Amino acid sequence: MIIHDFQTGRISGAGISERIGLELMRLGANILAQFEFVGFSWIARIARSIFRSSRPVRVIFSKDCVFEYPYGDGYWGVLLHNKITYAPEIEPYLKAFSNIPYVFIDCGSNYGYMSVLTSSAEYGSKPTIAVEADRQNFQMTARNAEINGSRYTFRHNAVFSKSGEKVTLGGTKHEARSINQDIQAGHLEEVDTLALDDLSSWLNDQADNLPVILKLDVEGAEIDALKGAGTILERDCLIIYEEHGADKSHEVSRYLKDVLGMRLFASDEKRLQITEISNYDELDVLKTNPRKGYDLFASFNDFWIEHLGQLNNTEN
């Protein structure tokens, strides 16, 4: 087992060849951090092709928070850069909400990273369910649940407006596979759909009417997912969603604001501060990189809007 202690950066259990590959990837991540890690996947591909290994890397964040990914992964390998916060627009806020009772629904969980965090003690041990469409990603989500004491639930489905349909998932990169027909390429597989309303029994098992944080990172299927989430949206619900930098129409934000009547909020990565998005020109200013996804918040519930506002009064 290759172990990476995230706090110290120490790597243990690696052979000589594996260690060289990991240090090469670490160097690449450190250099490319200032460029938002553009080009890191190329470095990871070289490292894993020359310094081969079939063993996973297990990252230790804390005693009850560990995360595995395949050696040489061109996406998660950036964690070798020990000063990184993987999701700086999300993680500090979820940590700040650790004392608030809520249920976390992780749509597009990939390898289960956010589910590992929210179900950990540091983040308040929230009841969590991870939903992932890609079979290989789902297996990693299940694996990360297992090594963290099976403390969160997981489902292998594509979130959609209706349950029980068959859709085709495609994409060349595991972190960007989608049921969006416009970007199908490379790896293809058929997967069953899940309407989020059909998670109501699981939600009710946690506690009646607990607030919900719904994370939507489903590569173009966000609006379809929201159309199947009516009962969840009737709760005190905070949505964390991704706006793609290349989408100049701000389609998801427009749906949330204009159709569902939600208020939109952006976070400051450097300070624990929240700013309301009052018009779409502000999104034009925010979304400077067409290759990047921007995480935003949306809600029409006073409960969550008040808690977001309270963050601006927090000293950091």
Image (cartoon, helix red, strand yellow):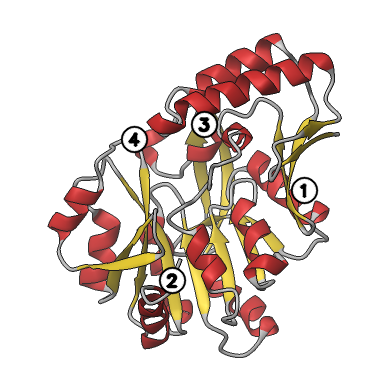
Between 291 and 9, which is closer to the camera in this rendering?
Answer: 9
Disc assigned to residue 315: 2
Query: Residue 98 in the image: x percent, y percent?
Result: 59, 74
Q: Gap in Å between the C-alphas at discs 1 and 2?
A: 37 Å
Q: Secondary structure at mark 4?
A: loop
Residue located beneath label 4 in the image = 291
Query: Residue 267 in the image: x percent, y percent?
Result: 35, 61
Q: Residues within 10 Å of mark 4 (few under 14, many from 20)?
A: few
Q: Residue furthest top?
A: 50
Tell me the amino acid under the disc marked 1. Answer: Arg
Residue placed at 60% from the left, 82% from the top?
101
Q: Horizontally, is 284 left or right of 244 in the view?
A: left
Contact flag, marks 3 and 2 (Cβ < 8 Å): no
Q: Quadrant of residue 150?
A: bottom right
Residue placed at 70% from the left, 64% from the top?
120
Residue located beneath label 1 in the image = 143
Contact flag, marks 1 and 4 (Cβ < 8 Å): no
Image quarter where the N terminus lies is top right
Residue located beneath label 3 in the image = 173
Of callouts 1 and 3, the N-terminal one: 1
Q: Secondary structure at mark 3?
A: loop
Disc assigned to residue 118: none
| Up-down relation of residue 272 to residue 307 (above or below) | above
